[in-house]
Amino acid sequence: MSAQHHRRETCRLCGGTHLSMVLSLAPTPPANAFVPAEELGKTQERFPLDLFFCEDCAHVQLLDVVDPRVLFEHYVYVSGTSPVFVKHFESYAAFVMERFKPIPGGLVLDIGSNDGTLLSFFQKAGMKVLGIDPAQEIAAEASARGIPTICGFFGPDTAGEIAAGHGKAEVITANNVFAHIDNLSGVVDGVRNLLAPSGVFVFEVSYLVDVFENTLFDTIYHEHLDYHSVKPLGAFFAAKGMELVEAIRVDSHGGSLRGIAQLKGGPHAVGASVTRAVAEEERLGLDKASTFRKFAADIDALGAELNALLKRPQGRGQAHRRFRRAGQGHHLDVPFRHRSRAGGLHHRRQPPEAGPVHARHACAGAVVGGHRGEEAGLSGDPGVELRPADHREERRLHQGRRKIHHPHSQGRGRVMAEFLLQSDIKEICERLGDTAHDFTGKTVLLTGGRGFLGRYFMEIFAYLNKNVLKKPVKLVAADNLITAGKEGSVITEYPHTEFIQHDVIQPLKWKGGLDYVIHAAGIASPFYYRAHPLATLEVAITGTRRMLELAQEHGARFTFFSSSEIYGDPDAKHVPTPESYRGHVSCQGPRACYDESKRVGETLCYIFHGEHGTATNTIRPFNVFGPGMQETDYRVLPNFANRIKGGHPLNVYGSGNQTRTFCYITDAMVGFLLVILRGVPGEAYNIGNPKPEISMVDLVNRISDVLGKPVAHNVIEYPDSYPADEPNRRCPDIRKAKLQLKFEPSVELNEGLRRFLTWADGVYTGEQ
């Protein structure tokens, strides 16, 4: 054992010796051990990071204890730099004053008081305040600001000195420090001796329920010795002559427990929150070691997903990554940290305006989210350029993470899924570059707003409004919600976006101005247009005419989403297929409703452009895929992903020798937007990726490569629900889009498959 570290042999709460290791993480330096630049050449000591479960009282804890002077004497996190936490502490103080009505002018002691932010609000309420904190610089600054602060650690001796000099305390608080202390018994002895008969001890700690439900393994680090739950805490306080009277869940730090204790027999009744919390912990199985072993397996799986994700380049081939380390050190606005480098990583912490930094060494394991309610992110790989994360995107990640319900839901995967989708949106907008400014101050009507492509358009315009455009684009999104599915039927509220439920085969009266009409409504899945042939015809013919009339009325540019299906089954000399190819399509048969309706839609665009001068463009997408495709879409890749999630062999229809090319959604959306903004009026454009053209059996082999394991498959006859006469080959000639629009796909098939399958694993149920 190091002189700076020891391993205890008993439970920190009950003193029991029946302790089982349930999780072992890689040894690391302390999370907040920022290193001065002049010490970069020195090797930092790493300490074990193993989680133990007490079989006697069910308390979860670290047994390896790093010397608190190493952890806290030069601690760099400052509460007052976070506006969210300033507001939190303001409401915290108001809650205590209102709920427990301490004697006016009485003493409030804050253990681990940091810069005194919480105490300042008690001070404003007329209370006498005193802080105690071991961080020398921070304690000195707090005292200079008028919050008297003792630099040191709290224990029975300190409590006696405070009682002698200041009297008994009406309120003692300990926020996000009650999990940091090895000698909890001594601290609570000090609290009991210092507390007035009517006083309360209020503490906030990271709550084990949140850590477990939301897979917050990034909160497991050396400063956090304990992962508290109510049942063990209740027994611990009772053994110390105190009683827990409230156990309230709060949102700070990604999910926390606010516990309130008093001297046994004190004036406050034990609240129902305590019994409810214990019941919920038992329901989740937090009183069983086996539960945490399953938790460890989930962490291993998530780490594998994240490390795969972090190998993916973003934007135009750049290896940019969002980066967060476990620990409080991820704030980028604290002066103390700007002069130092992170423990174990040795990358410089700079102010937000300082630009990118580089890591020499990786964190121990990739980390999803953050332990802060208002900030979250990812750890990085070695040799990767790192940038400060965008907090707005991270808040969405955190909100997504709150959906997790262990062990039955897919919340962990949904965090990954939402990250992938938002990362794709950012990549699209960055690749669009200055062209996006053409949308400044414009009004866009989008049909099919809750479909696969519609969701991307809505997210893209929301991102541009937040991050790019000086004057926002107004988006009017229309959808009849019939085929939107359970995901699409949830209407996301975006600034500068109006959603209207409307069927495009009906006339739409729009009183405001319109600059662009994007007609993306349609029934694109063979399964659905086989089942609804008349509806397929109507939306592509009548709906297109209605939208063209609206565009003509307002003088708007019109973009029609056609399909590569208009080429039918091309002969070999026309593969790759250019826009000039007239097609080999049957007007009869189960596919005709879709193929012919798209051809008529294109004819309508041609007529309106020629007869009425409407600026029309037609897009012919080739097998676009990516996050956001419904599990019940029934096209090949959603079908494969669904069966993989359900543990079933893949079904390849027909011979399996039919070939396709696949275009990942980020490439496709860039191409679509270039057509909308830069397309030559009256022209049609193929948008897709011409390489590689592969058979369906080869596609299965590609998926096996991406997953790193063989994937079983069966070659079977087409089901009755799937339309016959499937084209043998489909591959686009995109030279026209390259020359006129500078369109160039950049996502290789394996990379696109990895992104999509990772997303689908977090969202699909495998039950179809």
Image (spheres, grey):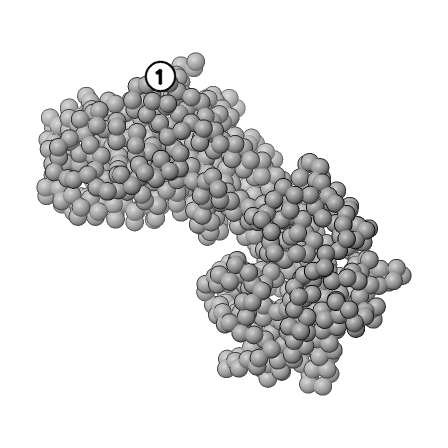
Determine the residue located farthest toward the right in the rendered image.
573
Question: In the rendered image of this protein, does residue 303 appear above or below residue 674?
Answer: above
- Residue 244: name its quadrant: top left
The answer to whether residue 241 of the structure is visible from this angle is: yes
Residue 401 pos. (x, y %)? 46, 46
At x 45% / y 63%, what residue is drawn? 493
State the residue in front, 302 or 153: 302
Q: Give the left or right position of residue 201, taking residue 557 as reference.
A: left
Determine the residue located farthest toward the front in the rendered image.
720
State the residue in front, 607 or 654: 654
Q: Give the left or right position of residue 315, taking residue 391 as reference.
A: right
- Residue 216: name its quadrant: top left
Residue topped by disc 1: 17
At x 39% / y 45%, what residue is drawn? 373
Task: Give the quadrant of the N terminus.
Answer: top left
Residue 269 pos. (x, y %)? 16, 40
Mark 1 secondary-structure assignment: loop
Question: In the rendered image of this protein, does residue 89 appear above or below residue 442?
Answer: above
At x 79% / y 58%, what residue is drawn? 731
- Residue 405: name its quadrant: top left
Question: In the rendered image of this protein, does residue 329 appear above or below residue 719?
Answer: above
> How many numbered marks, from 0 up?
1
The answer to whether residue 71 of the structure is visible from this angle is: no
- Rate crowding at label 1 as few (under 14), some (14 to 19) or many (20 or more) other CA atoms within 10 Å: some
Residue 600 pos. (x, y %)? 73, 76
At x 87% / y 62%, what residue is drawn? 571
Q: Amino acid at mark 1?
A: Thr
Residue 402 pos. (x, y %)? 43, 46
Question: In the rendered image of this protein, does residue 140 appear above or below residue 42?
Answer: below
State the residue in front, 131 or 196: 196
